[in-house]
Image (cartoon, rainbow, N blue to C red):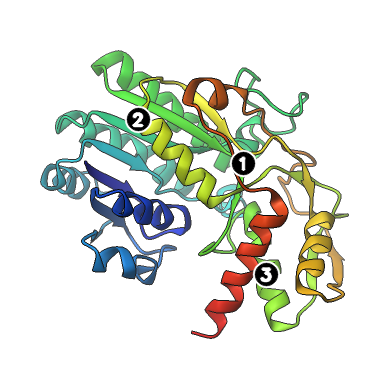
């Protein structure tokens, strides 16, 4: 199969590219390398994956790349994911997350792409949810521009399906973590903590550490993308573990895995941060046939090992 991955040099995107190459796809990765790393694709490129460096805000360049690649499926992962930057400059955030997504959809429409799998966010869209775990039917109440822009982008997928019959599906992720993670956004806390452990530094916790998130391993997110691409169902699907883990839990588990007393220091809570976030994954289980496979302890062990290995390269 011919596939194209926007944000393909990023944390989740490069892991997805690896899986697509492994199953025999012809893969083109698109990335502006503002946060993605070319090195993330070294192995995939040695096996035939291509990288085109371009910005999804450049609609003409993106359309040309799609025309050349002739993908059957586009996995759209390119995004601005920093919550704090989105609050500081919401207009800029929207040019990437909304305008860039429209460019992806327009390129897909023009060049006959069969399906678009869109990456979105669960916690940032549901906001301070009254129902935990939160189902897809919950009224969205974003508390940061990032969540609002991702919600707006989802609306354009629905519009293109209604206007043009473009088959698409959106995956709303929990807090994704794992090897190659960049310490950006809320989920970046695990990458930051692993880096601190590997270099003997203390962890910094913003707030009281009791805030909870639904941490989902990147390999399981890749699996969800493959399931969603193969399905015909549209709409939105939560991708998480349906399990709450606090920041204090992360510190305790990581310290235990490393066999050290991993100390933490508290700092003031940050604007726009939620107290609790956890996703109901029943729809993904019943419709997409997807299940998370890695519990938090096993996923953290794998991530910590990868973090240590990266320091010795």
- The N terminus sits in image quarter: top left
Tag 1 residue: 174
Q: Nearer the viewer, mark 2 or mark 3?
A: 2
Alpha carbons under labels 2 and 3: distance apart = 34 Å
* Disc 1/disc 2 C-alpha distance (Å): 21 Å
Point out residue 102 in the picture as x, y percentages from the top left corner.
Answer: 32, 34
In the shown orientation, is residue 295 left or right of residue 312?
A: right
Identify the element where label 3 is drawn.
Answer: helix
Dot 3 surroundings within 10 Å: few (below 14), some, or many (20 or more)? Answer: many
Residue 55 seen by the camera: no
- Observer-side mark, 1 or 2, equals 2
Q: Secondary structure at mark 1?
A: loop
Are circles 1 and 2 on residues that touch, CB within 8 Å?
A: no
Is 147 situated left or right of 113 in this image? right
Q: Quadrant of residue 136?
A: top right
Circle on res. 283: none
Q: Earlier in the sequence, mark 2 or mark 3?
A: 3
Residue 194: give its label.
3
State the residue position of label 2. 230
Instruction: Specify the quadrant of the image occupied by residue 140.
Output: top right
The structure residue drawn at horizontal position 67% and vertical position 69%, both measured from the top left corner, is: 194
């Amino acid at each position: 199969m011919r596939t194209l991955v926007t944000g393909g040099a990023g944390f989740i995107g490069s892991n997805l590219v690896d899986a697509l190459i492994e199953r025999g796809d012809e893969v083109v990765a698109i990335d502006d390398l503002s946060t993605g790393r070319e090195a993330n694709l070294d192995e995939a490129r040695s096996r035939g994956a291509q990288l085109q460096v371009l910005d999804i805000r450049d609609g003409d360049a993106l359309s040309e790349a799609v025309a050349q690649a002739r993908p059957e499926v586009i996995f759209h992962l390119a995004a601005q994911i920093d919550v704090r930057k989105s609050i500081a400059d919401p207009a800029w955030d929207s040019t990437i997350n909304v305008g860039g997504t429209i460019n992806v959809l327009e390129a897909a429409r023009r060049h006959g792409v069969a399906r678009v799998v869109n990456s979105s966010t669960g916690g940032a869209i549901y906001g301070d949810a009254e129902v935990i775990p939160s189902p897809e039917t919950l009224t969205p109440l974003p508390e940061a521009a990032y969540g609002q822009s991702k919600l707006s982008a989802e609306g354009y997928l629905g519009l293109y399906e209604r206007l043009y019959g473009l088959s698409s599906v959106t995956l709303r992720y929990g807090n994704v973590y794992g090897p190659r993670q960049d310490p950006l956004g809320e989920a970046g806390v695990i990458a930051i903590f692993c880096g601190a452990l590997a270099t003997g530094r203390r962890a910094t916790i913003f707030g009281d550490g009791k805030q909870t998130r639904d941490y989902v391993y990147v390999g399981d997110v890749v699996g969800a993308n493959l399931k969603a691409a193969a399905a015909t169902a549209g709409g939105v699907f939560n991708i998480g573990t349906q399990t709450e883990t606090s920041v204090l839990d992360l510190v305790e588990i990581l310290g235990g895995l490393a066999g050290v007393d991993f100390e933490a220091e508290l700092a003031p809570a940050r604007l726009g941060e939620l107290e609790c976030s956890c996703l109901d994954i029943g729809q993904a289980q019943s419709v997409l046939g997807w299940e998370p496979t890695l519990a938090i302890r096993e996923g953290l062990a794998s991530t910590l090992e990868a973090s240590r290995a990266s320091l010795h390269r």
